[in-house]
Amino acid sequence: EAVRARAMLRELDALATHRYVSPYERALIHLALGEHEPAVARLWEARERHDGWLPYARVDPRLRPFLLTPEVAAVLQPR
């Protein structure tokens, strides 16, 4: 599964060079792989780009284990 997830990330990263790919969705893949730092970087990117999925982060069960970490909490603070 991890090999497939990393391949998917590479594919999405390549696609993102010429079209919009949700940074929030890419963050979720990083989190599933246990890659906290890249996930937080993608969440910040989602915030900067006004990703439509970011407002749902507080109720997204895939993000629940990470909501209380200081890095993720900082991303989700109101502007």
Image: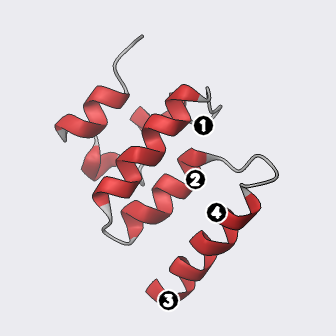
Q: How far, Cα to Cα, is label 1 from label 4?
A: 18 Å
Foreground: disc 3 or disc 1: 3
Q: Nearer the viewer, mark 2 or mark 4?
A: 4
Q: Which residue is mark 1?
A: 53
Residue 13, numbered circle: 4
Q: Secondary structure at mark 3?
A: helix
Q: Are marks 2 and 4 in contact (CB under 8 Å)?
A: no
Q: Are marks 2 and 1 in contact (CB under 8 Å)?
A: yes
Tell me residue 23's x, y (percent).
58, 47
Q: Quadrant of the C terminus?
A: top left
Relative to 47, is 28 above or below? below
Secondary structure under tag 2 reads helix
Quadrant in the rendering for residue 49: top right
Q: Tell me how far mark 4 sits from mark 3, CA to CA.
A: 15 Å
Choose top left, top right, bottom left or bottom right for residue 36.
Answer: bottom left
- Disc 4 versus disc 3: nearer the observer: 4
Let me know if residue 1 appears in the view. Answer: no
* Secondary structure found at label 4: helix
Residue 46 horizontal/vertical position (percent) = 54, 36
Report, in whole angstroms, how far the alpha carbon at label 3 lies from the one at label 1: 25 Å
Residue for badge 3: 3
